Amino acid sequence: MVSEHAPQPAAQVLVASNRGPVSYAVREDGSLEAKRGGGGLVSGLSAVDDKMWVCAALGDGDREAVRRGVGEPGVRMLDIDAGTHADAYNGIANSVLWFVHHMLYQTPVEPVFDAEFRRQWASFEAYNRSFAEALAEEAGRGAAVLVQDYHLSLVPGMLRELRPDLRIGHFSHTPWAPVDYFRLLPDDIAEQLLRGILGADRAAFLTRRWADAFIGCCTEILGGTGRTRIGVHGLGADAAFLTRRAHEADVDERMAALREQVGPGRRTVVRVDRTELSKNIVRGLHAYRALLDEHPEWRERVVHVAFAYPSRQDLAVYRAYTAEVQRVADGINKTYGTADWTPVVLHVKDDFARSLAAYRLADVALVNPIRDGMNLVAKEVPVVSDEGCALVLSREAGAYEELGEHAITVNPYDVSATAEALHEALTMPDDVRAARSQRLAEAATALPPQQWFLDQLEALRRG
Ligand code: F6P
């Protein structure tokens, strides 16, 4: 533990993201408990020296840690005013930018860009400015700065003005909206967002499709991407980590418990998601219900293991969606369940070991998002599954570009077709399923997280 104010050498590689690699909770006795996250950036950054991660304090525990000067070496947490952060994160990033890029609006009634929106936008600018200023302070001469995601769309432009010597990259972990949808935004805001990202030397995306959509917006609205180069880096699953972690004792324990819940000899359709509007969990449940209706031979012989973990619960629309997931799952169990068969096993409490246990057990993985930057679950299940799994995959997930050939692909809005895809996946002969799962795993691990990160860094430095 070091104070965030302790002098540190100027960093040569910097990452900036809203959510950082560590978070804090205040224990009952007043002490702080640190919780470390994983993911592609954590793993990627572990491969370089002289680094710094700039992130926002997200909750009371994080703010307390900043105030007490508690922190991790190489992490600077910004104690941005809580109201400003809430406007920027909940108000703009998650309620506007996320909705635009995932095309989630019910357009007859929303969005509405009014005075309240303009007030929140001013907070979004202030929040982005705090990041740009912190990065400008921490970066060594000529350093590489990798700015992450839609929360920080304005940072590259702001940072370029403060520090023209830096190599600046921006990476979008989400899809990018097609130009007609992007133009729902007020004209000046659309322009400001594009110019913000174009402040970077390089703007990168998870798939060609999202990169092309961004280029389309820049061309139509600004006449081009200027000097900013566009890159594509399709983050893959971390096979080494996942296979090791999936065979630890706590995962074995959870497998035993899940097997008990599923019952002997039954097939499993597994899904693991944040309870996120774009993940299409409710239509997935409707498709499962349609499967039981159209193919009654599956009754008592299959269980839908659905993990829907809490996300963005500050937003009313996410709370309502979570309640709807629960309601539809309960309805299926009520209609079809028997004394010893629960058709849907729904868990809503986050448990990574249990997710891995479900991955190992999966006969079928259901990944049917409305739209998704990549979707790592689609890549992780084939890597971890014990006997090989069939993948039912939405053509709107970024992962489709790499996995589509070996998956059973669906239009995520077509519930009947998704039910048929589940039937096809469940009836796939074991040897075919194992062979396809193997090909899925190979495609899923083509670009492991460390390489994904190092490729971006190298491309940025190459200029
Ligand atoms: O996909 C974009 C993203 O920011 C991911 O990087 C992250 O895993 C996810 O959304 C969760 O978002 P939040 O930080 O709002 O929980």
Image (cartoon, rainbow, N blue to C red):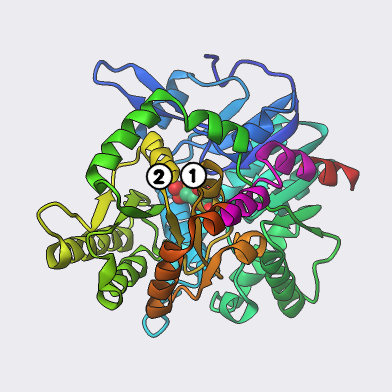
The numbered mark, 2 or 1, whose residue comes first in the sequence reads 2
Which range of residues does the magenta coloring cover?
A: 435-456
Q: CA distance from mark 2 to mark 1?
A: 6 Å
Which residue sits at x=83%, y=41%? 458
Q: Nearer the viewer, residue 414 or 120?
A: 414
| Label 2 element class | helix
| Label 1 element class | loop
Q: Amino acid at mark 1?
A: Ser
Q: Nearer the viewer, residue 201 or 400?
A: 400
Q: Which residue is mark 1?
A: 385
Residue 101 in the image, given as x and y percentages of width and height: 55, 67
Q: Which residue is mark 2?
A: 361
Which residue sits at x=50%, y=59%? 391
Q: Amino acid at mark 2?
A: Leu
Most common SS among magenta residues: helix
Mark 2 in CB contact with mark 1 (< 8 angstroms): yes
